[in-house]
Image (cartoon, rainbow, N blue to C red):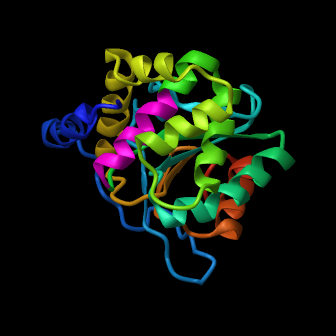
Amino acid sequence: MITRRFALAFAGAWLATTAAAQQEPHAFPIRADDGEAVVNSKIPPGVDPTKVPGIVWKGPADAKVSLIEYFDYNCGYCREAVGDLDALVANDPAVRLGLVDYAVLSPDSAEAAKVHQAVLALAGPDVAYDFHRRLFSRRGHANGAAALAVARELGLDSKKVEEMANSATVHDALVRQARLAQQLRLEATPSFVVDHVAILGWPGTNSIKRVVAEVKKCGTAVCR
């Protein structure tokens, strides 16, 4: 059984975090696919979101652009984004995609996140990335049972996955991820970090592609 201890610890992480970023609703003039302004803010100096434990990376480690998604397995917009983000990283060797479990919607989401982290620990990032795509492709609500079913599809031992999912290693990684998300005031899923900019919500595929292209071109989210 996948315990729900992280769900309680997550709430504690939010309450314990005091080093919140300065919220700049529009640090850069980023537009969503529908033309609306996208809420975004600069990441505080000295904060490196690529260094938190438990990120599932897809793409070359030396890629020019790191695009990090904070997601929840029960988030509809996250499900919508999966295929487009996969295509983006598959077609552009200058980009690597990082997946951060940000289980904010329910205790069931926390269970699924713990299994994802267990798969990463036991089988590595390639299998964890495959798990991620498969779980989002399943119909219905994501929880511990659904996540374990996907792990079994991938040939992993359910007992070992459960043990790792309930371990202090997984618990600590998820709490550290949640604390950083709170520090960056990522109050929606999905949210993204690219270069030194935090983007709140799903702006759409074309918008994300534009930001990535700008970072590749001039090293910032919007070239002046």
Picture quadrant of residue 94 = top right
With 43 as the anchor, is 140 left or right in this view?
right
In this rendering, the answer to whether 153 lies above or below 82 is above
- Residue 41: image location, x then y, percent: 41, 56
Q: Residue 223, can we see it?
A: no
In this rendering, the answer to whether 37 lies above or below 13 is below
Q: Which residue is drawn at 45% across and 41% down?
A: 145
- Residue 31: image location, x then y, percent: 58, 74
With 146 as the anchor, is 172 left or right in this view?
left
- Residue 193: image location, x then y, percent: 52, 47
Q: Which residue is drawn at 65% across and 59% down?
A: 211
Furthest residue to the bottom?
35
- Residue 183: image location, x then y, percent: 29, 42
In this rendering, the answer to whether 156 lies above or below 175 is above
Q: Quadrant of the N terminus?
A: top left
Check residue 110 for magenta coloring.
yes
Picture quadrant of residue 212 = bottom right
**Magenta stretch: helix, strand or loop mostly:** helix
Q: In which quarter of the image is the C terminus?
A: bottom right
With 11 as the anchor, is 126 left or right in this view?
right
Q: Residue 76, can we see it?
A: yes
Q: Residue at x 14, y 36 (%)?
A: 16
Check residue 86 for magenta coloring.
no
- Front residue of this view, candidates 39 and 224: 39
Q: Read off the magenta span.
A: 106-117
Q: How many labels does the image show?
A: 0
